[in-house]
């Protein structure tokens, strides 16, 4: 099998829809081809990133089929973008991503204080690791564009290569931060990309695998923890390369993440500074302690296997697997709120640079991993693993064809529920759709796409209004405010009061940098006559299920590596 054959079938490979012969042929090719390994890694990481985000929509069962169809349709357009985008990068950007939730003023203040406290904890944790001999202070510097970047320290084990960096505006005016994108912030070296339950994949380049922006009171200094893939041997040298920084505010609590690549850069060009900051860094590896568990938990009738507990200086990772088709009515998508309890301490999911992910396979169980703060320095005799819920996906397709020549509202049926499209307005640059769910059934996560003149706009943002706004635990949605934007400009008058932007789809494989920007992006009050069709394609829905399961383990009975 050739690389081009793998490219054509890689979506089916990930989605699990190939016959066994084709699946094994691709698997054999990937093991021997470093390029296809990297392609598969990049696509998998894009999906894992989305799944690791809080309160986001999980990738639907037929997501990869949808992506494949869009890519194939794009090939037929014969429209060459003026930015070269690789096939896998082109596909990866179709992954749905989380947009920051909108908090009330008091909520923002509370979360900001929590973040400041967590920043102090993370800094102290790194300092303690270095003091205990598991890292090194460096203070290596590089300067460009009157901006100095200092690599203050490093901690490396066989799960992460963690750097503590500082970015200082020498003019004393602004805060700058590295951008999470494999073309703007990366490390060169000899790495072993690792999915925790598998052996490493060799690569000579690593993007940021995880990051935590630290609170810095100075108006011109930013500090951050950034994690790259583990190096391949006990002693290595890597080179940190940063070729763009973004201006951030004092209220930012995470590094900028360039989902959308060149589209993101064009959209935020006024905040981005190009340059070149490079520094070579010595790396000495610390080894993890690995417990082979292979213990079973019953979660609401579902069989969950916890495979390994990997305890390293920087974090602790638990791997698990399950069959996604244990119930004929739905797909088991993911587990919710996995915790470990030991010696009176409760370990919850690590929020900074942990390795949480879920990867589905066709002929094998779904594999997952979740990371926690480490117990490396005092490994307990007993631990308790607990899960308090799971998420499912139900595939029920329906196409809602909105008649642009008829008045609004227009009503449609979906699973005994009435979906009412209240209004559609806009043009070839910007379209807005208002939609209500009038019952009898309400959904937590209704999976759908919006197609204008048979194509999706570059970015579509989905804001929702809850059915019971006074109950934060109830996730059922009453109304939708959908904004499709075909430009790289920001429309600020969004969303409608009472709505919260939960997520967006960024589809930039057709995106081209436009030399001329609109003076101002405006939304028309009516529907432009150039808009001939508007279709909403519902793929299914997803929901959370409450359930509890736990197992108690004595670690000394398991084989250590």
Image (tube, grey):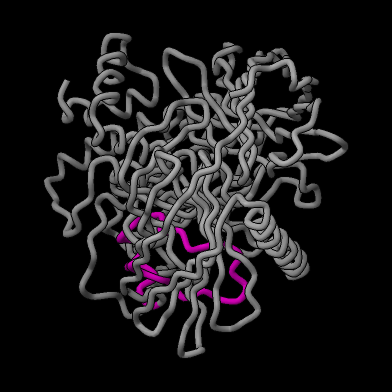
Q: Horizontal placement of 515 versus 106: left or right?
A: left
Viewer-side residue, 138 vs 98? 138
Report the label total. 0
Q: Residue at x 18, y 29 (%)?
A: 3
Q: Quadrant of residue 380?
A: top right
Viewer-side residue, 238 vs 352? 238
Say if 431 sits above or below 516 in the image: above
Q: Residue at x 64, y 49 (%)?
A: 351
Locate the N terminus and report the quarter of the image it occupies.
top left
Q: Residue at x 69, y 44 (%)?
A: 373
Observer able to see residue 434: no
Q: Horizontal placement of 342 versus 193: left or right?
A: right
Q: Residue furthest right?
A: 344
In magenta, the rendered stretch is 243-270
Viewer-side residue, 455 vs 69? 69
Q: Is residue 182 magenta?
A: no
Q: Is residue 249 magenta?
A: yes
Say if 244 sits above or below 85 in the image: below
Residue 412 screen position, x and y as percent: 51, 36
Observer able to see residue 81: yes
Q: Horizontal placement of 208 versus 303: left or right?
A: left
Say if 277 sits above or below 541 in the image: below
Residue 94 screen position, x and y as percent: 37, 44
Residue 538 screen position, x and y as percent: 47, 34
Q: Residue at x 47, y 83 (%)?
A: 169
Q: Residue furthest left?
A: 78
Residue 84 screen position, x and y as percent: 19, 53
Locate the C terminus and report the quarter of the image it occupies.
top right
Q: Quadrant of residue 289?
A: top right
Viewer-side residue, 25 vs 410? 25
């Amino acid at each position: 099998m050739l690389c081009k054959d793998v490219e054509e079938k890689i979506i089916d490979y990930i989605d699990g829809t190939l016959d066994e012969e084709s699946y094994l042929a691709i698997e054999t090719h990937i093991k021997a081809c470093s390029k296809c390994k990297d392609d598969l890694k990049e696509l998998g990481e894009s999906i894992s990133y989305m799944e690791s985000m809080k309160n986001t929509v999980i990738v639907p069962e037929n997501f990869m089929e949808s992506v494949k169809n869009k890519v194939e349709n794009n090939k037929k357009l014969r429209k060459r973008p003026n930015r070269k985008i690789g096939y896998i990068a082109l596909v990866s950007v179709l992954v749905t991503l989380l947009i920051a939730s909108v908090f009330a003023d008091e909520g923002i203040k509370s979360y900001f204080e929590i973040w400041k406290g967590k920043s102090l904890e993370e800094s102290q944790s790194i300092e303690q690791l270095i003091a205990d001999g598991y890292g090194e202070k460096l203070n290596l510097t590089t300067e460009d564009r009157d901006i100095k970047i200092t690599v203050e320290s490093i901690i490396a084990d066989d799960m992460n290569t963690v750097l503590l960096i500082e970015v200082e505006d020498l003019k004393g005016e602004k805060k700058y931060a590295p951008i999470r994108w494999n073309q703007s912030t990366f490390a060169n070296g000899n790495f072993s990309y690792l999915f925790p339950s598998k052996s490493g994949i060799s690569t000579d380049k690593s993007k940021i695998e995880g990051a935590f922006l630290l609170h810095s009171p100075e108006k011109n200094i930013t500090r951050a923890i950034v994690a790259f893939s583990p190096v391949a041997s006990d002693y290595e040298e890597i080179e940190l390369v940063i070729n763009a920084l973004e201006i951030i505010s004092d209220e930012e609590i995470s590094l900028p993440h360039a989902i959308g690549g060149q589209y993101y850069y064009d959209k935020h060009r006024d905040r981005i500074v190009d340059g070149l900051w490079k520094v070579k860094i010595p790396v000495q590896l610390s080894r993890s302690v690995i417990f082979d568990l292979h213990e079973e938990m019953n979660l609401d009738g579902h069989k969950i296997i916890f495979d390994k507990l990997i305890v390293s200086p920087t974090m602790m990772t638990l791997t698990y697997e399950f069959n996604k088709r244990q119930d004929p009515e739905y797909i088991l998508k993911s587990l919710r709120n996995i915790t470990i309890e030991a010696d009176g301490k409760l370990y919850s999911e690590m929020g900074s640079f942990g390795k949480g992910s879920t990867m589905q396979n066709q002929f094998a169980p779904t594999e997952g991993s979740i990371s926690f703060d480490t117990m490396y320095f005092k490994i307990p005799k007993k631990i308790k693993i607990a899960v308090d819920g799971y998420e499912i996906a139900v595939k029920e397709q329906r196409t809602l064809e909105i008649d642009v020549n008829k008045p609004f509202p227009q009503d449609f049926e979906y699973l005994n529920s009435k979906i009412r499209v209240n209004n559609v307005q806009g043009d070839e640059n910007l379209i807005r759709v208002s939609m209500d769910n009038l019952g009898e059934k309400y959904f937590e996560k209704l999976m759908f796409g919006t197609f204008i003149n048979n194509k999706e706009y570059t970015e579509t943002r989905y804001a929702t209004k809850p059915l019971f706004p006074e109950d934060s635990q109830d996730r059922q949605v009453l109304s939708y405010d959908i904004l499709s934007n075909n430009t790289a400009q920001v429309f600020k008058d969004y969303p409608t009061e009472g709505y919260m932007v939960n997520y967006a789809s960024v589809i930039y494989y057709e995106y081209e940098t436009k030399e001329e920007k609109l003076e101002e992006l405006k939304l028309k009050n009516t529907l432009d006559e150039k808009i001939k069709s508007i279709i909403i394609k519902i793929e299914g829905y997803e929901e959370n299920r409450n359930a509890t399961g736990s197992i108690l383990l004595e670690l000394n009975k398991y084989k250590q590596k």
